[in-house]
């Protein structure tokens, strides 16, 4: 097996591209794919400040690393979810990466800042943990980006993630979500710009990128992912991809090219007010995150809640 570019021994075969790459050319391929997404969607302008939502997994560390390599000014934000050892180990991968490269990281711990963690929120709401977890992460990322004057929030969603979310939204005809499923969402109504520069890379590719770059990451699945429908959609698409390499990319990029604009009208563009507790934009009297904070009161360690008590830890 030889590298498509230099004919030296290859370390990875990409069936959907019918190509093999050596280590150097695979890393270059990954950077080029990210660069192409940034370019295609006009994601960032030179000199902008980016905030990477980093979890300790392969995707968020890979996107942070590639953005650095491409010359972008990117800081990280880690949200402590309080999921047993899983959260502690995940954070250690992030802090290792940060100290190795001299980066700036903000840590917001849900329990310290808001008085609940993901397990207690799941208990209080009676819903799957991912529901409170996703809501909390979105709130913390959005708020940190707006308060910190960042130009965009960057997440490590990859091609497998986006194809699985698209599949799930199509299965249930979630037309309002379909209209917003794009690699770039512009800032609007008090929400920051959101960018997903990894959408041209698969999970396997981001894992290989980390291994070849010597980046250690959390390999365990989140123990609270049980009941997460997303994983089922991923498995279904993996079966299709195995039989017909390139199916995921055709499904997702075909959607972006030919279909997504037809769903724009379904986006809920009702006017938003301001949450009286936290100042976030909301279409309800109090935002969903502050309602979650109230519901969890009494289900976890009591911690005084104020609107401005993010326990940020800066590490250099
Ligand atoms: S961390 Fe949170 Fe994920 Fe765990 S509880 Fe679900 S959403 S699976 S990305
Ligand atoms: Zn090569
Ligand atoms: Zn609020």
Image (cartoon, grey):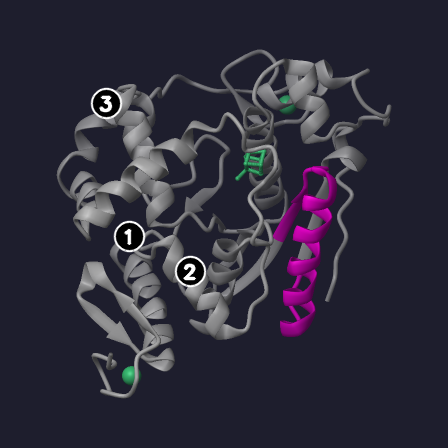
Task: State the residue at coordinates (61%, 20%).
Answer: 275
Q: Which element carries disc 1, helix, strand or loop?
A: loop
Q: State the residue in front, 20 or 311.
A: 20
Task: State the residue at coordinates (16%, 43%).
Answer: 254
Q: Residues within 10 Å of mark 1 (few under 14, many from 20)?
A: some
Q: State the residue in front, 43 or 226.
A: 226
Residue 185 in picture, x, y percent from top left: 37, 40
Of the four image quadrants, the one with ligand 2 is bottom left
Residue at the disc numbered 2? 206
Please give left or right for residue 268 compared with residue 226 in the image: left
Whichever of callouts 2 and 1 sits on the residue coming sooner in the sequence is 1
Image quadrant containing the C terminus: bottom right
Q: State the residue in front, 139 or 249.
A: 249
Residue at the disc numbered 3? 265
Q: Which element carries disc 2, helix, strand or loop?
A: helix
Q: Is residue 182 above or below residue 75?
A: above
Image quadrant containing the N terminus: bottom left
Q: Is residue 279 above or below residue 204?
A: above
Residue at the disc numbered 1? 41
Cβ atoms under marks 3 and 2 closer than 8 Å: no
Residue extending furthest toward the left: 258
C-alpha span from label 3 to label 2: 34 Å
Residue 166 in picture, x, y percent from top left: 29, 34
Total numbered labels: 3
First to last magenta residue range: 77-104
């Amino acid at each position: 097996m030889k590298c498509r570019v230099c004919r030296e021994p290859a370390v990875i075969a990409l069936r959907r591209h019918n190509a093999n790459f050596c280590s150097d050319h695979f890393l270059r391929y990954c950077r080029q794919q990210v660069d192409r997404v940034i370019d295609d969607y006009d994601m960032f302008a030179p000199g902008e400040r980016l905030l990477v939502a980093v979890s300790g997994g392969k995707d968020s560390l890979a996107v942070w690393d590639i953005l650095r390599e491409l010359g972008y000014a990117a800081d990280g934000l880690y949200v402590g979810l309080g999921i047993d050892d899983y959260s502690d180990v995940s954070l250690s991968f992030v802090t290792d990466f940060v100290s190795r490269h001299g980066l700036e990281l903000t840590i917001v711990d849900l329990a310290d800042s808001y008085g609940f963690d993901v397990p207690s929120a799941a208990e209080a709401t009676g819903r799957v943990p991912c529901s409170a977890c996703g809501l909390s992460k979105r709130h913390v990322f959005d708020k940190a980006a707006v308060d910190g004057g960042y130009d965009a929030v960057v997440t490590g969603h990859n091609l497998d993630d986006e194809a699985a979310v698209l599949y799930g939204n199509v299965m249930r005809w979630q037309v309002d979500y379909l209209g917003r499923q794009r690699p770039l969402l512009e800032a609007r109504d008090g929400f920051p710009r959101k960018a997903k520069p990894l959408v041209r890379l698969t999970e396997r590719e981001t894992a290989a990128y980390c291994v070849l770059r010597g980046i250690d990451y959390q390999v365990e699945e989140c123990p609270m992912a049980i009941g997460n429908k997303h994983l089922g959609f991923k498995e279904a698409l993996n079966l299709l991809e195995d039989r017909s390499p390139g199916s995921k990319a055709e499904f997702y990029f075909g959607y972006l090219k030919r279909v997504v604009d037809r769903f724009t009208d379904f986006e809920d563009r009702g006017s938003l007010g301001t949450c009286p507790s936290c100042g976030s934009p909301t279409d309800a009297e109090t935002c969903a995150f502050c309602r979650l904070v109230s519901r969890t009161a009494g289900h976890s360690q009591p911690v005084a809640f104020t609107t401005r008590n993010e326990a940020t830890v800066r590490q250099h």
